[in-house]
Image: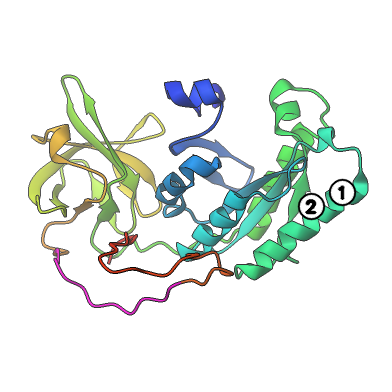
Amino acid sequence: MNYEDIDKAPEEKARKITINTSHIEYQTANRHYGHIDCPGHADYVKNMITGAAQMDGGILVVAATDGPMPQTREHILLAKQVGIPKLVVFLNKVDMVDDEELLELVEMEIVELLDFYGFDGESTPIIRGSALAAAEGRDPEIGAERVLELMQACDDNIPIPPRDLDKPFLMPIEDTFSISGRGTVVTGRVEQGKINIGDDVEIIGMGADSKTTCTGVEMFKKDLDYGMAGDNIGALIRGTKRDDVSRGQVLAAPGSIKTASKVEAEIYCLTKDEGGRHTPFLSNYRPQFFFPHS
């Protein structure tokens, strides 16, 4: 995907915001990154959880002109809840703020927010810059140079996570596509194990379990022989219609997991000050829960 195509849906282009998550790739001298662009707009912050659940680290973008917004709190809270270990902050639009004291105040507010939600705000790098300047190739001191500094901060501060390669293959399904003449593609981040072309797999969940075979593996428009834990892949599966697969199901090695219709859990409800509900639960209220997998 090209940079210009990150916000590619018609409504995203019309409103100039991200609504759904998008994936791009790039690399530094030390690492290859799969980058998931998540919605920042308040109306679509819930969509962020789809991308956040796949992340090993995060770049929190805050506009210097506005400072942390209400949805910034939700982003940080969701990042903590889904287990993202480290964040790096990019303070954007610094070319629109001439007051150094104002920039410092925004940074202090960011540090306080990070500390409040359980991240180490003092040790979290905050890089000042202008994404627009970098995209337009101007003012390198706040543009391209700051982007390189940002990626160096990612290299230095976001640890490489261990991968469960020895466990049976498991991939939560994020999205589905149909390819004319080839079949159905399911996409997601491989949580554990490895999938090879020709492997038999099961589609589990949503009351519609089925068996199929992986006939192709793709990552960032490149055909691969296999996908492994940590990879964001598309798996081409045989004999399955797109309408028969949906987000919320998982692709798994045969016989490795089973579904359950009932679970027993202890629930902690966040207080208002912790970013939780402002009102109490009422009779017949039906909450929605997010489970990465179990």
Which mark is drawn over residue 91? none
Q: Is residue 212 above or below residue 79?
A: above
Q: Estimate the x, y position of residue 14 in percent, counting from the top left.
A: 51, 20
Which quarter of the rendered picture does the C terminus lie within?
bottom left
The residue lying at 36 percent from left, 76 percent from top is 267
- Give x and y (percent) for residue 71: 57, 50
Depicted 187 relative to depicted 55: above or below:
above
Residues shaded magenta: 259-269
Q: Left or right of 166: which side holds 150?
A: right
Q: Residues within 10 Å of mark 2 (few under 14, many from 20)?
A: many
- CB contact under 8 Å: marks 2 and 1: yes
Q: In this rendering, would 85 be left or right of 193?
A: right
Q: Position of residue 182 (x, y in %)?
A: 17, 25
Magenta span main SS: loop
Q: Is residue 153 left or right of residue 241?
A: right
Q: Residue furthest front?
A: 283
- Residue holding disc 2: 106
**Does residue 18 appear anywhere in the picture?**
yes
- Look at the numbered disc 2 and give the secondary structure of its residue: helix
Q: Position of residue 120 (x, y in %)?
A: 67, 68
Color scheme of the displayed model:
rainbow
Few, some or many residues within 10 Å of mark 1 (<14, 14–19, 20+): some
In this figure, which residue is indicated by the disc labeled 1? Answer: 102
Marks 2 and 1, how far apart at CA: 6 Å
Q: Tell me the amino acid under the disc marked 2.
A: Val
